[in-house]
Amino acid sequence: MTRVLVAIPTYNERATIADVVRAVRKSAPNFDILVVDDGSGDGTGGVLQELNALVATHLCNLGYGRALQTAIKYAVARNYELLITFDADGQHNPEDIEPLYRRFVEADYDLLIGSRFVESRNYRAMPFARRLGMYVFSMLVRLLASQRIYDTTSGLKVIHRRVFGMLTGRPLVDFHAEVIVYLILRRYRVGEFPITVGARQHGASMYTWLSSIKYPLKISLLILLSVIETKLIRRHSHD
Amino acid sequence: MTNLRILLTAAGIVIMAWVLNLVRRDRLYVGYGVLLLGSIVGTLVAVLVPQVLTVLTRILGSPSSFATFTVLALLFVLVMLVYILSQLTRIINRVTVLVQALAIQQARRGHPSASVPLQGDSSASAPSPDTSRAAE
């Protein structure tokens, strides 16, 4: 039986975390769940204690990317085969976990992204700035890695153990385009599978107006590094 | 191109490569890498394309391009200093939170060394540590 860990990074999602954990438990009863509390200050920790959930608590806020790395390190330590990342804000549908997992296993992916846009192929539902960003990074992935990924910022992903070491040993921002480009260039199998995502009902997004300036610069730098690194590795292997 | 410009360009490229390598090895936070690379590129542009400084000098009403460059560089250094010191404070606060959490954990287990006072400066203030149960 494949050991699967569902990781739910959370930061100040007190209003939704209980429902999310219960729903994931119901939809994926054979999978273990780990909630990574990234230094929440709104009482999320107390809610998680009442749920009797398995929790890894950061004593201070480290960010979404580091919270996912904590989950991956836990998965490595406990010999999990697969890691499924799932958002704590209630936007993801837990019913999507099982079909995503089945598709991942059937097609032997290394990373399978639950994608909001792979079927519709457009970003009309998003605000303008995010629409532009998603389009730009989607095209950038296509340009650099010769593969079009429509949803580069999805928080619902299935990750194979083969990739764990790579994701804990290098700089990452939010496990978005910078990871996708790196894995594709290193010849890992990356794909998308359609999912449904609802609107956020409570709390606030981790992305602020300042993020819209910082995020693309950080992602672009890491993508540039991935390209340089891969080209140097390939040149070295040809010599 | 003068020797000075050649030297500055070469130095800029070497420093950029160094920054990229540090970011790649996770020895330098990617956000700081972006700031440093932006600064290096900006400096190289100012050095290699004198017309940029000339335009800026005219806009700002500076007496000379050299004065423009100096003022802008000083402003940039001041902003970076504030930013870096705020990041340093953030790190100090995090270390404080961790140290206090460890001390409390030791005290809760009744560890013999719990009665030994902490060494060093205890003036940094920090929020109370989270008491949620951690994963095994």
Image: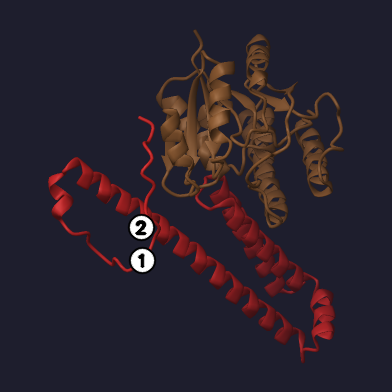
Chain colours: A brown, B red
Instruction: State the residue in front, A99 or A108.
Output: A99
What residue lies at 16% left-to-right and 43% top-to-bottom? B110
Neighbours of disc 2 within 10 Å: few (<14), some (14-19), many (20+): many
The picture quadrant where one finds residue B120 is bottom left
Instruction: State the residue in front, A52 or B43.
Output: A52
What residue lies at 69% left-to-right and 33% top-to-bottom? A154
Neighbours of disc 1 within 10 Å: few (<14), some (14-19), many (20+): few
The picture quadrant where one finds residue A131 is top right
Q: In the image, residue B79 lies at what x, y percent?
A: 60, 73
Instruction: State the residue in front, A38 or A112.
Output: A38
Q: CA distance from mark 1 to mark 2?
A: 7 Å
Residue B77, relative to residue B127: is it above or below?
below
Residue A172, relative to residue A86: is it above or below?
below
Q: Which mark is residue B124?
A: 1
Q: In the image, residue B128 lies at what x, y percent?
A: 37, 54
Which kind of residue does numbered mark 2 sit on?
A: Thr
Q: Which residue is mark 2?
A: B96
Which kind of residue does numbered mark 1 sit on?
A: Ala
Total numbered labels: 2
Q: In the image, residue B17 lies at what x, y percent?
A: 61, 53
Residue extending farthest to the left is B112
Residue A75, relative to residue A88: is it above or below?
above
Can residue B127 be seen from the camera position used here?
A: yes
